[in-house]
Image (tube, rainbow, N blue to C red):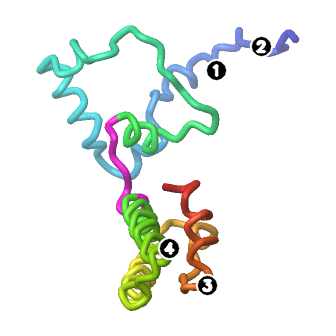
Amino acid sequence: MKENRDTSHPATETKREKIPNIPWFAHLGHDWMDDVVREQEDLGTFTDLPGKGKRLNLKPNFNMVDTIMENNHLLPPWLRLRGEIYQQMKYALTLLDTGHLDDLEQRLSGINQQIAKYNRSCPSPLLQRNLVSVKTLKDACERWSGDA
């Protein structure tokens, strides 16, 4: 569709020339991050980066922080804790299967403390998990297996 704008009016042209191209956040103060990036560009930090000229491998629902952490094999603390809890649950399951119930109760107490810590640290209440008992250990271990 063609726009019907009259750009020939001199007053309109002078107004456009007077308006500088200022980022929306400029009124908040000095943008120090631009200075850091410019300084690093001058030092040549960005000239020979790995993957330069290659396409980005973007996933659906792209989240830059998650992708950077995943590419560098980093996990947030709550995800690391989730993996540790799953490993402890697998060990507790072997104790249950072999009949070491005395050790199992103590192990489950420690796992439940870790689950409480996990529930406090995970970013969403939807990700929180229930505590485990001898009766719920097998089901809980299966639920946690998809997450670890």
Q: Amino acid at mark 1?
A: Ala
Whichever of callouts 3 and 2 sits on the residue coming sooner in the sequence is: 2
Q: Does the magenta-highlighted stretch encompass residue 78?
A: yes
Question: Which range is magenta?
Answer: 72-79
Of the two numbered discs 3 and 1 in the rendering, the one whose residue sits closer to the viewer:
3
Is 79 placed above or below 54 here?
A: below
Gap between marks 3 and 1, in whole Å? 80 Å
**Residue, x 83% and y 14% (percent of image)?**
3
The residue at which mark 2 appears reads as 6
Badge nearest the viewer, 3 or 2: 3
C-alpha separation, residue under disc 3 versus residue under disc 2 = 77 Å
| Quadrant of the rendering where the N terminus is positioned | top right
Distance from Cα at disc 4 to Cα at disc 3: 12 Å
Q: Nearer the viewer, mark 2 or mark 1?
A: 2
Comparing 70 with 96, the one in front is: 96
Q: CA distance from mark 2 to mark 1?
A: 11 Å
Residue beneath disc 4: 97
Name the residue beneath numbered marker 1.
11
Q: Which residue is mark 3?
A: 135
For discs 2 and 4, the disc positioned in front in the rendered view: 4
Kindly state the secondary structure of the residue where label 4 is placed: helix
